[in-house]
Image (tube, rainbow, N blue to C red):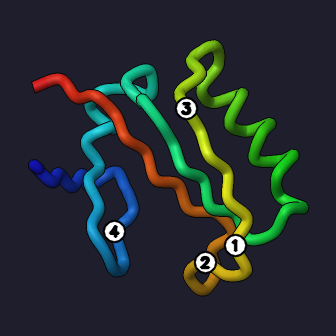
Amino acid sequence: MKSITTRDAPSPGVGHYSQDIVHNGLDRVLSMTVYIQGRELWPKVNQVYARVLGDHKPARAMIPVPEIKPGCLIEIQAIAAVNE
């Protein structure tokens, strides 16, 4: 796997990150796993998700968790096809 970091994306804290979606577009997303800190965020996340992705509907799992990283309410893992 080729890992790409861009100056426009936030610097990852801990873990494995690839920011290649920046160069390929959200229409290339195949699936997303969305971790949210509490079920009460579910409606707002749905609104933003629909606005950002529009008619593109990749597979999605939304998982409420008790805690993410300090200061974070949401974390998204995306799997996308990339242009080589």
- Which of 34/12 is in front? 34
Q: Residue at x 56, y 17 (%)?
A: 56
Q: What residue is pinned by disc 1?
A: 65
Query: Mark 3: which secondary structure?
Result: strand
Q: What residue is pinned by disc 4?
A: 11
Query: Mark 4: which secondary structure?
Result: loop
Q: Residues within 10 Å of mark 3 (few under 14, many from 20)?
A: few
Q: Nearer the viewer, mark 1 or mark 2?
A: 1
Sequence-first disc among 4 and 1: 4
Sequence-first disc among 4 and 2: 4
Q: Mark 1 is on which residue type?
A: Val
Q: What residue is pinned by disc 3?
A: 59
Q: Is 10 situated left or right of 65 in this image?
A: left
User: Real-space Cα distance between discs 1 and 2?
Assistant: 7 Å
Q: Nearer the viewer, mark 3 or mark 4?
A: 3
- Which of 7/41 is in front? 41
Sequence-first disc among 1 and 3: 3
Q: Residues within 10 Å of mark 4 (few under 14, many from 20)?
A: few
Q: Residue at x 29, y 61 (%)?
A: 17
User: Real-space Cα distance between discs 1 and 3?
Assistant: 19 Å
Assess whether mark 2 and mark 1 are in contact (beta carbons under 8 angstroms): yes
Say if 66 sits above or below 8 in the image. below
